[in-house]
Amino acid sequence: MKGKNTFTTLQIQTIKKLIAEKVIAPPDKQKGIRAKIRKVPFYYSDFSSKKDGYTVADFEALIRSGQIKISDGDDKPTTIETIKTIDKPKPVETKVPVIQKFNGLNHYLDNFKANRFDPKTNSETIIANSPGNYILCLKKKSNLPTVSLKPICTSFEGLQVIYTGIASSSLRTRDFRQHFKSNNAGRSTLRKSLGVLFGYKQIPRDSDPTTGKTKFSSADEQKLSEWMCDNLIMYFLPHLDFNNIEIELINHFNPPLNLKGNCNVINFDFRQLLSTLRAKKN
């Protein structure tokens, strides 16, 4: 082992802060940040043979599994389950680079590839509990519900891209819990779009039906959750500049389920149909 497997709370905070910086840093800056992490000393290679980078979520998973212990000088090192909370590091104050050209998007797409989540087989704990962006793709041999128009999809990692989104506070909460587990399409644009493509009947979301907000029946919401887990793959990227990256992702992939901010003439008719279906109250 090159590094250690027991760290103080302060060291844990430092490591997490540096990992978060590394994830969003350009390639020429990442080497220097890795050197700072190894001075703590933490070497991810002591715990994994993964070669395509690691995230804060990967580090937290090592704590949960007991491979990394937390000790503040007593005789009983603790794991993350035995302490109520560890203060999260303050947001990185270094300026986050803004993507201005498509060729600048390539670096971020490489980082997306390192953060792949399959809701059917992976634990939600691998998703970063921090702001960022996500890309949703159909699994191989999966297709969107059939309607009168079939959209043209671009691909990422060989999978059809259907939607991209942002999480302003937590990717884990926004991506997994609201989209895949919430069973309330009234709080998920993605769920609402998929549900109307399936032809599910919209019902009032709130006790006051005059709000106009809708969801689907419990049975339909459950069917929708199961379909999403069986047919979708999510890629995510912890990042502070999520709004600008979202613009670039929509322009680059033209996801058919993204209605807001999508002006591509390709799939225009499909987006119009989807918008009509979403507005229809059964």
Image (cartoon, rainbow, N blue to C red):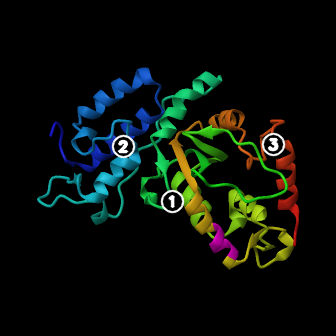
Q: Quadrant of residue 39?
A: top left
Front residue of 238 and 116: 116
Q: Which mark is residue 50?
A: none
Residue at the spot x=62%, y=35% of the render? 245
Front residue of 90 and 190: 190
Residue 155 versus residue 73 in the image, above or below? above
Image-based side of 109 in relation to 198, left or right: left
How many discs mark residues in the rendered view?
3
Residue where numbered disc 2 is placed: 16
N-terminal label among 2 and 1: 2
Q: CA distance from mark 3 to mark 2?
A: 41 Å
Residue that sits furthest to the left in the current view: 75
Q: Which residues are magenta?
A: 220-224
Q: Main secondary structure of the magenta part?
A: helix
**Is residue 97 visible from the viewing direction of this image?**
no
Nearest to the eye among marks 1 and 3: give it.
Answer: 3
Identify the amino acid type marked 1: Pro
- Residue 74, given in percent of the width and then of the height, sits at 14, 57
Residue at the spot x=69%, y=74% of the render? 220
Residue 104 versus residue 263 in the image, above or below? above
Q: CA distance from mark 1 to mark 3?
A: 27 Å
Q: Secondary structure at mark 3?
A: loop
Identify the amino acid type marked 2: Lys
Q: CA distance from mark 2 to mark 1?
A: 25 Å
Residue where numbered disc 1 is placed: 119
Image-based side of 69 in relation to 198, left or right: left
N-terminal label among 3 and 2: 2
Residue that sits furthest to the top in the current view: 28
N-terminal label among 1 and 3: 1
